Amino acid sequence: MSSSSRSTRRFFIENLGCAKNQVDAEVMIAALERDAWECADDPGGADVILVNSCGFIEPAKQESIDVTLAMLHDYPDARVVVTGCLSQRYPDELVVEIPELAGVFGNRAPHRIAEFLRTLDAGGTRVSVPDAALDSHERSRLLSLPGSAYVKVSEGCDNRCSFCAIPLIRGRARSKPLDAIVTEVRTLVDRGIREINLVAQDLASYGADRDASQAGRSATGETLLRAISQLPGEFWVRLLYVYPDRFPEGFLDIVRDDPRILPYFDIPFQHASTAVLRRMARPGTADGYLDLVSRIRDALPDVFLRSTFLVGFFGEDDAAFDELLEFQQRVQLDWLGVFPYSPEDGTRAMKGSPPLDVSPELALRRADTVAERQRPITHERVERLVGRTLDVLVEELVPQEPLALGRCYAQAPDVDGAVVIHVPDPADGPMVVPGDFIRCRIVRRNGLDVEAVPL
């Protein structure tokens, strides 16, 4: 149905990519609803379809293009607008290569999406990549499962790893004001959110750009966590993506002092070969990383650690890959994601378009090898949860089954395993409500998941 046959303008947003993209999508939803747009339940009921794209690596870019082309084909009466990272990185190329697009809108001012759509209505420019100061913005609805929300504390990155396109897409590191983050967390907790996931390209660098300092006090990751710890309420804070070479030791004290700050860290080591790490423009070493993990586990015996490995990068000969496998066995990570290297134009690694040292096929085989070796390690690490009594955040009830799905402190949204809760008869046990905590005993491991019974 076109907008000419109804008074309410309707939009649909297809969100792709990472948690930071999800926050941007939620900001766009709120901005459009403030401008009297209505969010459609499916693209068939929308006047405008927003594809909030990912442009990080080649497979993600291809997925964004494929979804965009599918929307144009399946919903010819709607206007399709590409937003997000792909549109920030390739705005002019998109409108040339896909002339059917109604518009292309960058990722640095999602709160201004309604203004851009008004420009399109008036026959204005089809391409807009505005910049804006980083701040908190209203999010009227969240795209996470019940009880959980992401809070973006900074944007961009100054680490300049040679393989990474993030600085080209998101720009230099810019920290959100500390007080704005604390207010955002307080607002979400007051709305009933039980899990706050703090996200950034590097939480360890929060405040380093000094934009976050207020009232003469320096803003750092540690001062941010301590400020959040002053808030009342029953909620979790999960820290996602902390660069290993600047891991703040003060984080460990804060987690010990406040059980609401979860003993869970996502620390992207990327590799263990010193030669490969230097080609990546990363200063770490395998021994340094092992020492960091040892210090974290000594301070927090129940901690769960997630990391990422990148295989097939320049300089990764057989010996370097063997170093990575040895490190994997020694470090015994709880959760691990592994990805084959994706050459990205504009990055330092691709300056001069050098030939790849590792073929894509070999890189994929190496990624499979790492994943296969990780499976028994993760099984053994997850087994530690069996027999423990833990709070579980309930996310959804399983239709037609006396089961519910949730997560405990050891499981981040979307990427880790789940807690399968055996729901008791209402007369025999506590109510299991999505979006709330329930106290459970973990009774067994089932693959990457665990099973639990409410107490």
Image (spheres, rainbow, N blue to C red):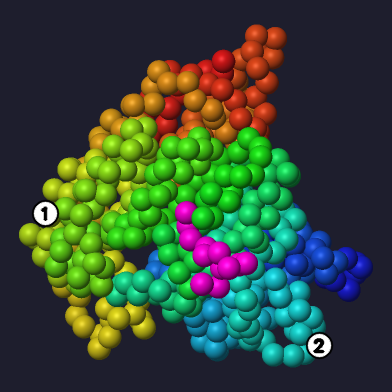
* Rendered-image quadrant of the N terminus: bottom right
Decide whether residue 216 is among the magenta residues: yes
Q: Residue at x 32, y 43 (%)?
A: 296
**Circle 2 Cα neighbour tier, 10 Å, few/some/many (<14 / 14–19 / ≥20):** few
Q: Residue at x 70, y 64 (%)?
A: 137
**Mark 2 or mark 1: whose residue is earlier in sequence:** 2
Is 303 positioned to the left or the right of 147 in the image? Answer: left
Could you tell me what secondary structure mostly forms the magenta stretch? loop
Numbered tag placed on residue 122 in the rendering? 2
Q: Is residue 134 above or below residue 12?
A: below
Label 2 vs label 1, nearer the camera: 1
* Secondary element type, mark 2: loop
Can residue 274 be seen here? The reply is yes
Q: Residue at x 59, y 19 (%)?
A: 423
**Magenta span:** 210-222
> Badge 1 is on which residue?
322
Q: Report, in whole angstroms, how far the alpha carbon at label 2 lies from the one at label 1.
A: 60 Å
Residue type beneath disc 1: Asp
Q: Is residue 70 above or below residue 41?
A: below
